[in-house]
Image (tube, rainbow, N blue to C red):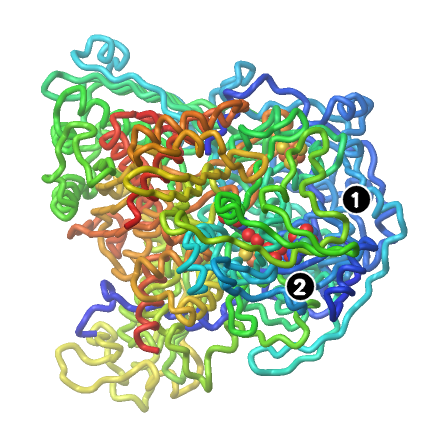
């Protein structure tokens, strides 16, 4: 879509008229602040309630006490110090945080840990077994499925999902089913080759 | 080595770390006792903070501190400028006063025990502003154009002229005179900026995303008034950067400030939205290119006038019009570069800075000229191929542009193209083929490196370089292994610490040339030292020999011409156990720089398919042929090229940061709204390298690749869009609506 | 994100009771968690409905019945869905990403909230988020916004893809609240913004979506979904069209048509449907009918192109449907 600001209307207020009037009195942000946040700051903030849950991460059962707000991504990275899983956007829009939950690929940034008591979680750290790389990991190195490596854990976990779902039949199919993982370095050709190769091997 | 390691397609030495999650990026360096900081960004585009209701938030769960200009430590902000900082102006000082210079500027920082607490408190912090209407549109009547003050001191020249271009264009038999626009773009690497800061007394450690560690060290030292050696910056891996981590942006200062304030390590990671505020962007540009030519297609005049945006407080410049000076043979050339100062953050270098934008205008205009002349676009370039750099009056150290066009057009199948616009179809789809030239300077900067030969036969090599993805770890390992004559497994190359030997910034495609040359020099020196030690060791067979009679080959020291097994590094070092250590710098001899014009060249070909009903534009394939001197690792080089082409697809068809003119906010500051190519957008991409030997650029003969890989792709696509539709779109990105009614 | 209490009811009744007293359902969370993190949403109580028996896909006679908790990916891959209503499968895989589709439920998809950028900016006026605060989009950057069904108070499009297909297929839905169950066409779930854009749907407080029912018919197979966007995947529609044709004796007996990306709700085009009935499935008839689609369109400053793109998208989608063997 195109939006060329230079062709837009003469700039008008971004707040409603009511708010702009207040804004001239020097309180733009205040006026714009909607009731939601306003109530929360004025009302006594609910104290953090933590919940206890069990998650099996890479085969190891973990009993954790988490803030119900924590995503699986933040639990992995900040609580368990499993920093292999990456946060690229925290908005479900990049795929860097992809892990397998109960065998399915999901974006862990939009997944509340508190809703996944008892879940089986697999992350990039769990793929290597006894010092031997998973065939998909190997294929990523061989086929240049990475450059900076930041999207790579998400790509690999997503690639595992893609193969398991039966969506790795052809390069075109892989491209379609791997489009939930953005790679800004543009390692896509290698990613497709790696997934295709590993799908053939497994 | 019998087979040279340089030129070998070796897989990445850090590949395993990257596919296992072991590679640690800035935000992965959790520290014991660490707190979390979240930046509060200004919600007005220009004005002043009049009140901060900090007290409300200080009591919120988990909050340890709320920092604003009122309570933040006043920092010395000693003068400091590196080559990557704008030469004119002063960097943004954070939390030092109540001014808001642009939307999204950091105005407060909340530190709390958990990320959730910090985020909640940051959102709850009520800040009151006095605001004015910012000016953020460079094409606005009120936006004043200025001559960049430092233009003559840098590469970005404000005015340059040879002959009389205006008259030549005015009198030319065939003319093109058009305006080309390019949108503001954000780097949007997958890794957000992040810093973990920890103080130990007056010593500061920063695990921080940086493409220029030694400068981050110097900059933070200057800001805090510390000796540089008190600051250490660590960054072994970079999750893509494309220029955004060349400068040290305010969040690094904020992390250090907060850590000192609370007396604990602090982790600060920007949100994706904040990545659009204070960490630079490719400036929006508007350019006029006027070409005059004879009916036979000889250029008689070129005018290239470019305007880029910058902030009010710094004059960011890039080489917007430089390519026009040397790319084609033409007696009359005039280029001009101006800035418009806006109420936004300062732009900065983004992959192919200047050249990528400038060449879109020039190569679009050349394509337009080819149609006016009825000459094949490649033939047009052939007719204007210069014998030398006519702006500098110097020979090119090497220039393979025509070979690139030959190889590329053959691989692409350019001969199958029918010249008439809208003449090619595949079923319902309109097919277009376009080509464009790519070029980028072959830079070189002073760099140093250290080689340590250990008793166990391992060679440790260190430089304060970075690897944002091109494969520095791997290519430097190859260089060191090559010059030491060791198998790569015996070389351990380390980068990413500011206390390693100094290197230039990791940008501008000069890492291979600069750091590679330094490593080569350090290897040669280490060999000399090892040889000297050997001849002084009575227990070694070469004892007493003159080092001039000895030679190193395949990692073994022998008397010249002798067939003996010789001595390995290990044989020599293990005698005492004391490692041989050599540190060397390398830089380009100034005579060479004086004598030659040094650039990479390439030719990019694109094929697009456009749906005539709904206007969707899909790139079907891209072929690039490049002359980049010696290719150290073809595997990595090809990845760089295809990655650059994908960046070019984004530039041509997707990427644009849109600012709301009412208050300067980036409206699409979201990964789902700032479009970048996804896997399904990617067609067949092919990169070829012409054989090119350049003995002048540097001892390795390498020219660099990161930038040229991007440059040229966008105009090739834009030219293909014209060929497909007959509609010339002179503003990037080209979206569906631009070709809908074509 | 505001703190909240998470409730995990064991029965549908308990869930409905909790929601009736002000708690908010959460299924996949791909809309809700995202907006809670932005503090656009701030429920104090969440009701996790994932353990409730609302999943699954079944066939009842001619009807396809999809549980509210069935995931987008699961529905798209279901053999019965692919066989009986391929339009649903096609519209689903054109949406979001494989990972999101593994998480997102059908019920949540229908109730996902708008992607208007100002909606998620707490420092911009937005009547939908904060009634009475104005609409920053009307005079702002509005290329992605609606041209149909807009009001002076809100111009955001409904972002769902599958909702467009369901509306085109005249799907119905069954919901249950504290006062019992009711069923109604999916189309009636969505409200026009009018002067109350914060009210987006017609569910009563606490009502839970149970399932979606789609009746099969001669149109079900000649049905296509076309999504037009600048990026090949992982992007919301600029314009999309869901069409289903039943053709008898070389003549369109019935055409069903709904469009996305242009309306403040999934937009069924009854006038185009009527214009196609009785016509031969040919480009000229498609074009004539498609011209009616923009009747009453109110383009904004930056989205005028949608007035051009919409009929073209419809024509192309009709052609695609006509080509189905
Ligand atoms: C980056 C990104 C891209 C996307 N792209 C697309 C796209 O291209 N096309 C598309 O269609 N969608 C797209 N989506 C949206 C996605 O499909 C929705 O977020 C998802 O379908 C919502 O389902 P959910 O189960 O996660 O809902 P939740 O987030 O759990 O809930 C959403 C809403 O529905 C309510 N709710 C959920 N279930 C019920 C029920 N059974 N009864 C009553 N109320 C209920 C909740 O209370 C909440 O208000 C995208 C999302 C993201 C993040
Ligand atoms: S269009 Fe609707 S959602 Fe967007 S700002 Fe206006 S009121 Fe809010
Ligand atoms: S971090 Fe989860 S999708 Fe981007
Ligand atoms: S390898 Fe850098 S983002 Fe994919």
Image coordinates for residue B243, horizontal then vertical, percent: 46, 46
- Tell me the chain of label 1: A
Q: Secondary structure at mark 1?
A: helix
Reply above or below: B512 against B598.
Answer: below
Q: Is residue B563 left or right of residue B150?
A: left
Quick one: label 1 or label 2, which is nearer the N terminus?
1
Residue pictured at 51% horizontal, 78% vertical: A126
Residue A4 vs B115, above or below: the answer is above
Task: Give percent across and percent down for residue C172.
Answer: 58, 50
Q: Quadrant of residue B75?
A: top right
Position above or below: A149 against B127: below
What is the tally of numbered marks visible in this picture? 2
Residue topped by disc 1: A37
Mark 2 chain: A
SS of the residue under disc 2: loop
In front here: A128 or B617? Answer: B617
What is the crowding at mark 1: few (fewer than 14 residues within 10 Å), some, or many (at least 20)? Answer: many
The picture quadrant where one finds residue C180 is bottom right
Q: Residues within 10 Å of mark 2 (few under 14, many from 20)?
A: many
Label 2 sits on residue? A112
Q: Quadrant of residue C244?
A: top left
For the C terminus of chain A, the quadrant is bottom left
* Picture coordinates of residue B509, whole percent (x, y): 36, 48
Residue C44: % across, % down: 80, 55
């Amino acid at each position: 879509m195109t939006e060329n600001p230079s062709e837009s209307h003469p700039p008008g207020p971004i707040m409603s008229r009511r708010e702009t009037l207040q804004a001239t009195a020097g309180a733009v942000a205040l006026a714009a602040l909607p009731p939601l946040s306003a109530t929360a700051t004025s009302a006594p903030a609910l104290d953090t309630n933590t919940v206890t849950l069990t998650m099996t991460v890479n085969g190891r059962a973990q009993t954790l006490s988490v803030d119900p707000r924590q995503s699986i991504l933040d639990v992995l990275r900040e609580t368990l110090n499993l920093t292999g899983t990456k946060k690229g956007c925290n908005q479900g829009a990049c795929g860097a945080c992809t892990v397998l939950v109960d065998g399915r690929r999901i974006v862990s940034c939009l997944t509340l840990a508190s809703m996944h008591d008892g879940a089986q979680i697999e992350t990039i750290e769990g793929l290597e077994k006894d010092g031997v790389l998973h065939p998909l990991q190997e294929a990523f190195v061989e086929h240049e499925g990475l450059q900076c490596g930041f999207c790579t854990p998400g790509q690999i976990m997503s690639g595992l999902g893609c193969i398991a779902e039966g969506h790795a039949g052809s390069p075109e199919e892989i491209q379609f089913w791997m489009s939930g993982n953005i790679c800004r370095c543009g390692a896509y050709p290698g990613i497709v080759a790696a997934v295709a190769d590993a799908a053939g091997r497994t | 080595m019998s087979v040279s390691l340089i030129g070998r397609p070796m897989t990445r030495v850090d590949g395993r770390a990257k596919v296992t999650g072991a590679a640690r990026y800035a935000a992965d360096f959790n520290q014991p006792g660490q707190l979390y900081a979240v930046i509060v960004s200004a919600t007005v585009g220009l004005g002043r903070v009049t009140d901060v209701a900090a007290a409300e938030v200080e009591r919120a769960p988990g909050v340890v501190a709320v920092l604003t200009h009122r309570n933040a430590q006043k920092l010395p902000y000693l003068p400091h400028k590196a080559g990557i900082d704008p030469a004119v102006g002063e960097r943004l000082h954070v939390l030092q006063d109540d001014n808001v210079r642009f939307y999204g500027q950091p105005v407060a920082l909340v530190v709390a025990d958990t990320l959730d607490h910090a985020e909640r408190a940051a959102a709850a912090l009520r800040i009151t502003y006095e605001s004015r209407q910012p000016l953020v549109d460079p094409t606005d009547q009120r936006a004043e154009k200025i001559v960049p003050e430092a233009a003559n001191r840098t590469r970005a020249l404000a005015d340059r002229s040879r002959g009389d271009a205006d008259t030549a264009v005015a009198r030319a038999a065939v003319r093109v005179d058009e305006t080309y626009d390019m949108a503001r773009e954000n780097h949007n690497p997958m890794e957000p900026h992040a810093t973990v800061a920890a103080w130990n007394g007056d010593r500061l450690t920063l695990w921080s995303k940086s493409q220029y560690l030694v400068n981050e060290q110097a900059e933070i030292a200057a800001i805090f008034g510390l000796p540089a050696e008190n600051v250490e910056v660590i960054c072994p891996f970079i999750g893509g950067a494309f220029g955004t981590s060349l400068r040290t942006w305010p969040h690094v200062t904020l992390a250090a400030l907060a850590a000192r304030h609370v007396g604990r390590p602090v982790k600060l990671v920007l949100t994706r939205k904040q990545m659009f505020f204070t960490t630079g962007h490719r400036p929006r540009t508007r350019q006029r290119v006027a070409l005059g030519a004879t009916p036979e297609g000889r250029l008689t005049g070129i005018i290239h006038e470019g305007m880029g945006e910058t902030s009010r407080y710094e004059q960011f410049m890039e080489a917007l019009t430089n390519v026009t000076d040397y790319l084609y043979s033409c007696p009359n050339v005039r280029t001009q570069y101006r800035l418009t100062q806006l109420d936004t953050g300062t732009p900065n270098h983004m992959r192919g800075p200047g050249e990528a934008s400038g060449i879109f205008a020039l190569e679009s205009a050349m394509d337009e000229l080819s149609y006016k002349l009825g000459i094949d676009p490649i033939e047009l370039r052939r007719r204007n191929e210069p014998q030398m750099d006519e702006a500098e009056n110097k020979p090119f150290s090497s220039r393979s542009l025509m070979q690139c066009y030959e190889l590329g057009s053959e691989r692409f199948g350019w001969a199958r193209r029918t010249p008439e616009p809208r003449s090619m179809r595949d079923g319902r789809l309109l097919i277009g083929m376009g080509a464009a030239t790519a070029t980028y300077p072959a830079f070189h900067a002073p760099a140093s490196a250290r080689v340590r030969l250990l008793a166990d036969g391992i060679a440790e090599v260190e430089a304060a370089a970075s690897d944002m993805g091109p494969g520095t770890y791997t290519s430097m390992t190859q260089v060191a292994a090559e010059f030491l004559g060791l198998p790569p497994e015996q070389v351990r190359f380390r980068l990413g610490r500011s206390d390693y030997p100094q290197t230039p910034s990791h940008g501008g495609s000069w890492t291979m040339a600069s750091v590679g040359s330094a490593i080569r020099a350090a290897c040669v020196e280490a060999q000399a030292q090892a040889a000297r030690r050997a001849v002084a060791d009575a227990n070694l067979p070469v004892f007493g020999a003159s080092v001039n009679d000895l030679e190193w080959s395949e990692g073994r020291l022998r008397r010249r011409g002798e067939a003996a097994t010789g001595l390995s590094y290990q044989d020599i070092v293990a005698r005492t156990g004391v490692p041989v250590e050599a540190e060397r710098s390398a830089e380009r001899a100034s005579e060479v720089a004086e004598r030659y014009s040094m650039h990479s060249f390439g030719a990019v070909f694109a094929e697009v398919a456009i749906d005539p009903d709904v206007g969707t534009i899909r790139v079907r394939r891209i072929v690039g042929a490049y002359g980049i001197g010696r290719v150290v690792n073809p595997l990595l080089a090809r990845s760089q090229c295809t990655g650059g082409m994908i960046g070019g697809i984004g530039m041509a068809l997707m990427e644009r940061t849109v600012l709301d003119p009412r208050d300067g906010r980036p409206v699409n500051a979201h990964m789902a709204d700032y479009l970048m190519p996804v896997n399904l957008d990617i067609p067949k991409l092919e990169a070829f390298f012409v054989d090119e030997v350049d003995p002048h650029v540097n001892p390795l003969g390498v020219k660099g690749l990161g930038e040229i890989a991007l440059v040229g792709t966008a105009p090739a696509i834009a030219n293909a869009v014209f060929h497909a539709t007959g509609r010339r779109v002179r503003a990037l990105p080209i979206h569906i609506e631009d070709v809908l009614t074509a | 994100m505001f703190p909240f209490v998470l409730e995990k009811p064991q029965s549908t009744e308990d869930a409905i009771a909790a929601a009736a007293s002000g708690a908010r359902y959460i299924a996949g969370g791909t809309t809700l968690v995202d907006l809670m993190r932005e503090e656009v949403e701030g429920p104090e109580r969440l009701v996790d409905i994932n353990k409730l028996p609302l999943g699954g896909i079944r066939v009842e006679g001619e009807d396809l019945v999809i549980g509210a908790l069935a995931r987008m990916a699961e529905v798209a891959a279901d053999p019965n869905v692919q066989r009986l209503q391929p339009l649903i499968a096609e519209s689903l895989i054109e949406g979001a990403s494989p990972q999101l589709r593994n998480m997102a439920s059908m019920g949540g998809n229908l109730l996902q909230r708008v992607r208007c950028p100002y909606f998620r900016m707490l420092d911009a006026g937005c009547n939908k988020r904060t009634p009475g605060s104005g609409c920053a989009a009307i005079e702002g950057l509005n290329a992605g916004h609606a041209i149909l069904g807009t009001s002076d108070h809100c111009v955001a499009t409904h972002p769902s893809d599958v909702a467009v297909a369901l509306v085109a297929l005249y799907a119905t839905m069954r919901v249950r609240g504290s006062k019992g169950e009711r069923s109604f066409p999916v189309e009636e779930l969505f409200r026009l913004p009018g002067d109350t854009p914060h009210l987006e749907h017609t569910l009563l407080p606490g009502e839970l979506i149970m399932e979606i029912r789609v009746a099969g018919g001669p149109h079900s197979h000649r049905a296509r979904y076309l999504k037009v966007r600048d990026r090949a995947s992982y992007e919301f529609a600029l314009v999309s069209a869901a069409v289903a044709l039943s053709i008898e004796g070389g003549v369109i007996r019935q055409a069903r048509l709904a469009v996305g990306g242009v309306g403040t709700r999934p937009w069924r085009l009854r006038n185009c449907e009527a214009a196609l009935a009785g016509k031969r499935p040919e480009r000229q008839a498609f074009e004539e009918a498609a011209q009616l689609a923009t009747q009453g369109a109110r383009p904004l400053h930056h989205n005028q192109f949608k007035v051009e793109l919409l009929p073209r998208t419809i024509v192309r989608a009709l052609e695609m449907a006509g080509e189905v063997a």
